[in-house]
Image: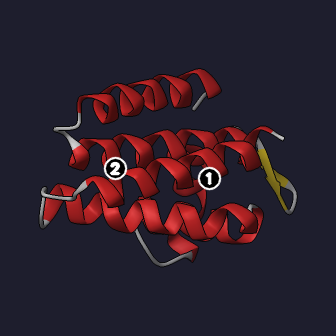
Amino acid sequence: MSKEHAEHNEAACDFLAADGQWDDWVVTTAFYSAVHFVEFKMFPMKEGEKEFKTFELYYEDTKSNSIGGFHKRRKRLVQSRIPEAYPGYKYLMDQARIARYKNYQVGKTIADLAREHLKTIKEHCLK
């Protein structure tokens, strides 16, 4: 994951927000931008004697010792490693899931809040 990929998704988020018709995708692209920002901040990561270059390598190496899928495991890492970004990250993860699977009619208020959370996450990850 890279900062450039995060910024690419953020630019897509901003583009969609400017159009005003794609609030569900604003939320979704904000979440995936946040995924890349937090992974950029956390990896490479050392845990015990092991160093993991990517989240994927961490996930594969530790999946037998832990409960939860890809997104839940990443969320727990954000909670423990970037706690100041966690509330916004959890919000984006939850809202993106709703937008993708339950109700795509998200609304501007939620889309704007998603962009605000992304901005906060980005600030925490780039400092």
| Residue at 73% in and 68% down | 83
The secondary element bearing badge 2 is classed as helix
Q: Amino acid at mark 1?
A: Tyr
The answer to whether residue 115 is visible is yes
Q: In the rendered image of this protein, does residue 66 appear above or below residue 101?
A: below
Query: Which of labels 2 and 1 is toward the front?
Result: 2
Q: Residue at x 22, y 49 (%)?
A: 24
User: Marks 2 and 1, Cα distance to the nearest angstrom?
Assistant: 26 Å
Position of 57 relative to 71 (above/below): above
Inspect the image, locate mark 2, and give the three-letter code of the amino acid beneath it: Val
Left or right side of 3 for 116: left
Left or right side of 107 for 102:
left
**Is residue 12 placed above or below 122 in the rendered structure?**
above
Marks 2,1: beta carbons within 8 A: no
Crowding at label 2, few (<14), some or many (≥20) Cα neighbours within 10 Å?
Answer: many
Which residue corresponds to mark 2? 27
Q: Which residue is mark 1?
A: 58
Neighbourhood count class around disc 1 (C-alpha, 10 Å): few under 14, some 14–19, many 20 upward: many
Q: Is residue 60 left or right of residue 111?
A: right
Residue 85 pos. (x, y %): 67, 61
- Specify the quadrant of the image occupied by residue 88: bottom right
Residue 38 in sight from this viewpoint = no
**Quadrant housing residue 114:** bottom left
Q: Position of residue 63 (x, y in %)?
A: 51, 66
Between 116 and 54, the one lying in front of the other is: 116
Task: Kindly identify the residue that appears in the image at 28 percent across and 53 percent down.
Answer: 108
